[in-house]
Image (spheres, rainbow, N blue to C red):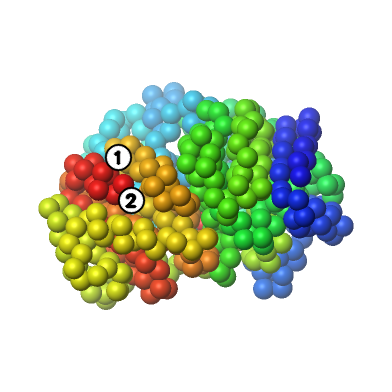
Amino acid sequence: MITTFSGNEGADLETRNPHGSSYASALDSLVQHKVASRLFGRDATLWGADAEAEAAQRLGWVDLASRATSVATAAREHASTLHARGINRVVLCGMGGSSLAPEVICESTGRELVVLDSSHPDMVAEVVAQDLSHTVVVIASKSGGTVETDSHRRIFVQAFTDAGLVPAEHIVVITDPGSPFDVAAQEAGYTVFRADPEVGGRYSALSAFGIVPSALAGVDVDALLAQALAVSTAFASDSPDNPVLRLGALMGEAVRSGVDKLVLAPSDSDAPTLGVWIEQLVAESTGKHGTGLLPVVVGSPAAAGFAESTPDGLLVSFGDLVPDVPALSGWSAHVRASLGAQFLLWEAATAVASHLLEINPFDQPDVESAKLAARSMLDGDVERRSPSFVVDEVEVFTSPDLLPNSTRTVEAAVETLYSLVREPRDYLAIQVYSDRLRDHRFEEVRERLAVKLGRPVTFGWGPRFLHSTGQYHKGGPATGVYLQITVAPQGDVQVPGRPFTLGEFIDAQAQGDAEVLATRGRPVLRLHVNGPFALRDLMEALV
Ligand SMILES: O=P(O)(O)OC[C@H]1O[C@](O)(CO)[C@@H](O)[C@@H]1O
C-alpha cells in the first residue's frame, strides 16, 4: 500500500507497506488513542508504568522550537564577541547526542565545524595541534561525566595554557545545571550554556546542544528553529495524515513483523550525515530488552543494502529526490522535509514506535556495561588478553571457541566470522577504532562486505558508536556478529590529572566492549593493526 502526505507545512512523507500488514490498524489505533496530542502534551504514561518516572523528566524536547530562541540569541551574541576577537575556528568535543546534531546542521549549511568525538590519540593530537589562538573549544556533555569529553577538556586546557593563551577565553561549556562540568566551568570562569535537564542527549538537536555550536560556526539557527515550529501543530494532531504517526507506525509495525533493520539513505547531498544522527536516536531509543530497530546507514539509494535490500530491511530515504527503489520486504518510506522538521519528525516518530514496542525510549541501560568494563580494564582489574595468533602487523583476538585451532590467516579468520551471519535476521557490525578523519576511506569496506555477504552490514567508528548503536548491539536482539578493528596510534597523549593516556583508554574501551559482547554470547573477532598503513592493506584481506 502506498500513502502520500503532501502537507505544505514543510514535511512530506511517502510510506509503503505490504498488503495485509498491521500498519493501517496500528495507525488507526494511534489516532484513536490520541497518541500525537498526548506526546506533544508531555504525557509520560505512553510507554508503560516502568518508564513513567523517567519519561516525566525527558519530554522537554517536544516544544523546544518555541523555547530555544533565547539560547539562539545568546549563542549568536557570543559568536559576535568571539569573531571580534578573531576566533573563528570551532572545535566541538562531545559524544553521541552531544555532537551529532550540530555536525549535521553545519554540514548541511556548509559551515566549518571540527567535531572531536574520539579518544584515538592521533585524531585528538591532530585537532589540538592546529591554530589554537583562533580556536574556540565547545565542551558539550549533558551529564558532565563522559570520560572522552572530560579528557578533551583537560587536554585543551593544558594546550591553551602551554600556548600562552587563557583557557577561559577559548572554552565554552554546554551542560546540565549542577553537573560536574557546570561546577568546574564556573570555578574556571568559562562561558557556560546550561541545557534543559528535561531533554535527553539524543533528543537534544534543537536544544543548546544543537544550537550553540552551530551558531558559533555561523549557522542561522533561528531559521532552523522556525522550520521545526512550522510543523509542530501538524505533528501534534491526532490525524492519520500526521507524518509522526505514520513514520512511527511504520517503524513499530515493521519491527513487529520481523523487519528490524532501518536502512537509511540520503537521496541527495543536502544533509549527508543526517543518517548518522538518526542512527543514534533510533538505536539507543529502541535497541533494548531484546527488541529494536537496527539502523544501517548507507551512502545513497544505489548502495548495497538499499538497492539490493534484504527481507528484513525497512528502507527509508530522505532528501528532495524520491528514489524509485522497491524494498524486498515491502516496507519503505521517503521523507522530504526541512532539516528542523526532520529533527522533530524523527524524535517524535521514534517515541511513537517505542510506544508500539512498549519500551522506554529515554534510557540506555546497556551502554553503561561497556563503560564499566573499560573502567575495570583501566583500573587493572581485568586481565589483558593475548592474541590467538599474529600475522605480520595484525594481532588476532577472538571470543571463546570462535575459530578452529588450525586458523592462522586473517582471511581464514574473517571467513569463519562471516559464515556466522547466516540466520534470516543476522547482521555484521564493523567497528573501527581509529582516526576517522584520516582513515575515512576505510568506510568503503561496508559496501563491499554488504555485496559479498548479501546481509545487512553496519559500520561504526569507535568509540563514537558506543554512544549510538552500542546500545542496540548489547540490548537488542542477539543477531549481531562483530568485526572489531583497532588501529595502534602513532603517538600517545597523556590525559592531564588522570592516571591514563588516551591510548590506554581507547584500548580499554575496545577490549571492554568486546568482552561484554562475548559474555552475551556474541561472536567477536578483534584485529589489532599496527598503524594506518596496515589498515589500508587489511581492506583487501577483509573482502
Ligand atoms: O552528553 P553526555 O552526558 O556526555 O552523553 C553523551 C552520550 O552518551 C550517552 O549517554 C550514552 O553513551 C548518549 O546517550 C549521549 O548522547
Q: Residue at x 46, y 57 (%)?
A: 427
Indicate which disc residue 432 carries. Answer: 2
The three-letter amino acid code for the residue at tag 1 is Asp
In three-dimensional space, the C-alpha distance between marks 2 and 1, rounded to whole angstroms, equals 10 Å
**Residue 503, quarter of picture:** bottom left
> Would you name the residue on which mark 1 appears?
439
23 on left or right of 145? right
Helix, strand or loop status at disc 1? loop
157 on left or right of 23? left
User: How many numbered marks does the figure carry?
Assistant: 2
Q: Nearer the viewer, residue 144 or 350?
A: 350
Q: Is mark 1 within 8 Å of ligand 1?
A: no
Q: Give the class, few, some or many, for how many residues have Cα within 10 Å of label 2's Cα (few <14, many ≥20).
A: many
Position in image of residue 471 (x %, y %): 49, 61
**Up/down of 120 relative to 218, above or below:** below
Q: Residue at x 32, y 41 (%)?
A: 442
Position in image of residue 304 (x %, y %): 47, 41
Position in image of residue 359 (x %, y %): 65, 66
Q: Residue at x 39, y 30 (%)?
A: 89
Helix, strand or loop status at disc 2? strand
Q: Quadrant of the N terminus?
A: top right
Q: Is mark 2 within 8 Å of ligand 1?
A: no
Q: Nearer the viewer, residue 524 or 378?
A: 524
Indicate which disc residue 165 carries. Answer: none
Q: Is residue 137 visible?
A: no
Q: Nearer the viewer, residue 83 or 28?
A: 28
Toward the right, the furthest residue is 32
The three-letter amino acid code for the residue at tag 2 is Val
124 on left or right of 178? left
Question: In the rendered structure, are the residues bearing label 2 and label 1 in contact, judged by CB atoms less than 8 Å apart?
Answer: yes
